[in-house]
Image: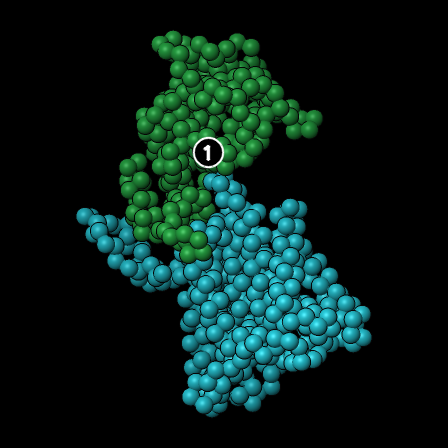
Amino acid sequence: MTDTVTDTGTGTETRTPLIEVDGIGKNYGSVIALRDVSTVVNAGEVTCVLGDNGAGKSTLIKVFAGVHQHDAGRFLVNGKPVRLSSPREALDYGIATVYQDLAVVPLMSVWRNFFLGSEPTLGGGPLQRLDRRKAKETAREALADMGIDLRDVEQPVGTLSGGERQCVAIARAVHFGAKVLILDEPTAALGVKQSGVVLRYVAQARDRGLGVVLITHNPHHAYPVGNRFLVLKRGRSLGSTEKADISLDELTRQMAGGAELEALQHELREVTTS
Amino acid sequence: MVTTTVDPNPEPAAVDERLSSSSLVNRLVVRPEIGALIGALVVFVFFSIVADKFLTMSGVATWLDDSATLGIMAVAVALLMIGGEFDLSAGVMTASTALVTAIFATQVGLNVWLALLLSLIFALAVGGLNGFLVVRTGLPSFIVTLGTFLALQGLNLGVTRLITGSVQVTGMRAADGYESAGFVFASTFPIGDTPFQISIVWWIGFTAVAAWLLLRTKFGNWIFAVGGAAPAARAVGVPVARTKILLFMGTALAGWLVGSINILRFTTVQANQGIGLEFQFIIAAVIGGCLLTGGYGSAIGAAIGALIFGMARQGIVFADWNSDWFMLFLGIMLLGAVLVNNTFRRRAERVRR
């Protein structure tokens, strides 16, 4: 284990990370999904989690998001050890997760999606009702603040493009005061242009002071926005590295790893020279 | 409720080229109940022309009454379907609750109101059990409620025969509190000289509350979400299990209301009543714009679906046709509705990458 995380490399201050995991592990029965992983998520920074399929990325974020509980190691939020029992509890800590496929409910309108689970209401008791006007106006404003220009907040989210849907989910998390934003493969299903759009919102969330966890298997998406790169392989950590200490080539090499590297580089060279 | 209201703050660049597809027609077409409304108008006009009695006051009272009890159930079933689940025990529940009320009132000798309260508790318990089993096991509600449907059917017959020695319970009229309970659940009110059943008022009231709940409350938002994408809803903190269990209890509540209306009106209940009705509720809900896959639909649409049902069933009688034709009509209505719904859903769900 070389990925000691107490020294962030910059060494300018000793602030408490929003999230810190230390030697965390998770088993599903006899399957070891995650073992001895350590990293930090700081405010105003992007921690990228990279790895191939089955590397344990999803398991790690499910622990962060309160969907699963870790079996080993320490999980600290604002310096205090916690054990999140539900997504709701994670949200209460300010940890919001945007999943790739299930970020939104396609048949519901943009504003209903935006406020889902945190609806503004009027009145109380049995007459408590949605504050529809406020919800629509707030949704429109919050989206505009993030630079998302939507035609109509009444339209079903399903009519939006994949990138726009991710952006609605990101804007929602930012609006509801998330301190940590976890993005599960936000660019996986998107084209080049749409990916760029989503990464721009990632950078915007970061600049607003959120700690962002960006899960991806594409180092080219991670490198431009990331501050720290945690590379996972078969449930193990290959190290959590500051951007200053790693180049894009090195990151790509780490992800591909060992014997597969030669094949990949060869392949890449063929692609670039052809 | 209608989404065609003009935005109070006019957009500076109102002539966005991307808005061209969002015409008035498109916006109306997005409403789930539009298909049912058009269907209801067609059926209404058709039977007004072919059957003389259809438009008389007594005719209207008849088909409204037929629609009412069906409509109460269809609306509750619609909410459940929007929440992504089915309740096949809903039909037999109308008989079970009536039997529980009747047995407590006539065999045990309780006051009718107390008997109604006990059957309400029974209904909510069964509904809660349905919901609990579905969310706990993750099995399709189709199978789980098929189980409770069969179990209730057996209980209805078995317990009734055990207690009364026959397959019906009679004698409600003699029970304490029958007058006042009957007034609430089974009286009539005159419009002109024609008596209209109070069930029509219950139907309208129940629909209004359900529509308000669905479109104007937090809970309604959750109903759409758990049916449309339960994992997404869970991820943003919606209590998925609680929402679904409450929806199952909602159909049970509607079953109790209809059972109470029936037992107090007819004062007799057969132990094998209600069987087969569950599909009528689902059909009415689907005609009213509900998707079988959940996440989309309308309470008002389901009430209109029930109205189509009632108008057609009674209209065929008024027209002196053989009631065999009703099933043909129903099949065509259902297929038409599903085709229309499918088109709408594609429109709403269309994904552009």
* Percent position of residue B329, x then y: 55, 76
**Picture quarter containing residue B174?**
bottom right
Give the image's coloring scheme.
by chain
* Percent position of residue A195, x then y: 38, 33
**On-image quarter of the C terminus of chain A:** top left
A33, above or below B183, in the image? above
Please name the residue shown 66% across and 77% down the image.
B175
Label 1: which residue? A92
Q: Nearer the viewer, residue A91 or B233?
A: A91
A116, above or below A267, in the image? below
Label 1 crowding class (10 Å Cα cut-off): few <14, some 14-19, many 20+?
Answer: few
* Percent position of residue B284, x then y: 53, 68
Please name the residue shown 63% across and 60% down the image.
B121
Which colour denotes chain B? cyan
Q: Which chain letter goes with mark 1?
A: A
Please name the residue shown 47% across and 19% down the image.
A79
Which colour denotes chain A? green
* Percent position of residue B26, x then y: 35, 60
A22, above or below B331, in the image? above
Please name the residue shown 56% across and 32% down the image.
A85
> Label 1 sits on what residue type?
Asp
Asked whether, in this view, residue A237 is left or right of residue B142, the answer is left
Q: Secondary structure at mark 1?
A: helix
